[in-house]
Amino acid sequence: MESELAQLQVRIVRYVDDAQPGWVAIEFADVGGQIHTVVDKVPIFTSEDICAESTYPRVGMLPCTVLKRWRDEDGGDLVRITIEHPLGDQSTEGQSEFVVMAGQLAEKKQRAR
């Protein structure tokens, strides 16, 4: 079965740790408005060379896999995503699946098997 790999648009909100290659916290909102935080290495979210002295927030991208797409009763395009694949990541609350608006995703990257 093929899965759609995508990039979720996120805000890099702070520098967390200098351990190589540098760690940052990102935030994004789900369809219900709940803010989720993920902490991981800088290169996961951006190709920029950022550090503790950089200006925040910054734009970033979170790799994810689209599990399902549908339209809600109000006509909004919704997407269920997981960050468990390809990253093996979770939010600071222990979640790896989220429902977001389709407009929060960047254009498709590739298809995974």
Image: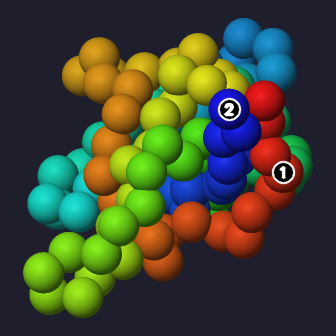
21, 80: nearer the viewer: 80
Whether residue 49 is visible, yes or no, is: yes
Three-letter amino acid code at the position of disc 2: Met
Residue at left 48%, top 43%?
67
| Quadrant assignment for the N terminus | top right
How packed is label 1: few (under 14 Cα within 10 Å), some, or many (20 or more)? few
Rendered position, 97 above or below 47: above
Q: Give the labeled residue for mark 2.
A: 1
41, 30: nearer the viewer: 30
- Say left or right for 64 vs 32: right
Residue sitting farthest toward the top: 19
Instruction: From the image, state whether disc 1 or disc 2 is nearer to you.
Output: 2
Of mark 1 and mark 2, the one earlier in the sequence is: 2
Colour scheme in the image?
rainbow
Residue sitting farthest toward the bottom: 75
Q: Marks 1 and 2, how far apart in space?
A: 14 Å
How packed is label 2: few (under 14 Cα within 10 Å), some, or many (20 or more)? few
Residue 100 image position (x, y, % from top left): 35, 60
Q: How many marks?
A: 2
Residue 77 image position (x, y, % from top left): 36, 77
Residue at left 35%, top 67%?
70
Rendered position, 18 above or below 72: above
Residue at left 80%, top 46%?
111
Q: What element carries label 1?
A: strand
Residue 109 image position (x, y, % from top left): 81, 56
Whether residue 13 is visible, yes or no, is: no
Residue 93, label in figure: none
Residue at left 72%, top 11%?
19
Q: Give the labeled residue for mark 1.
A: 110
Three-letter amino acid code at the position of disc 1: Gln
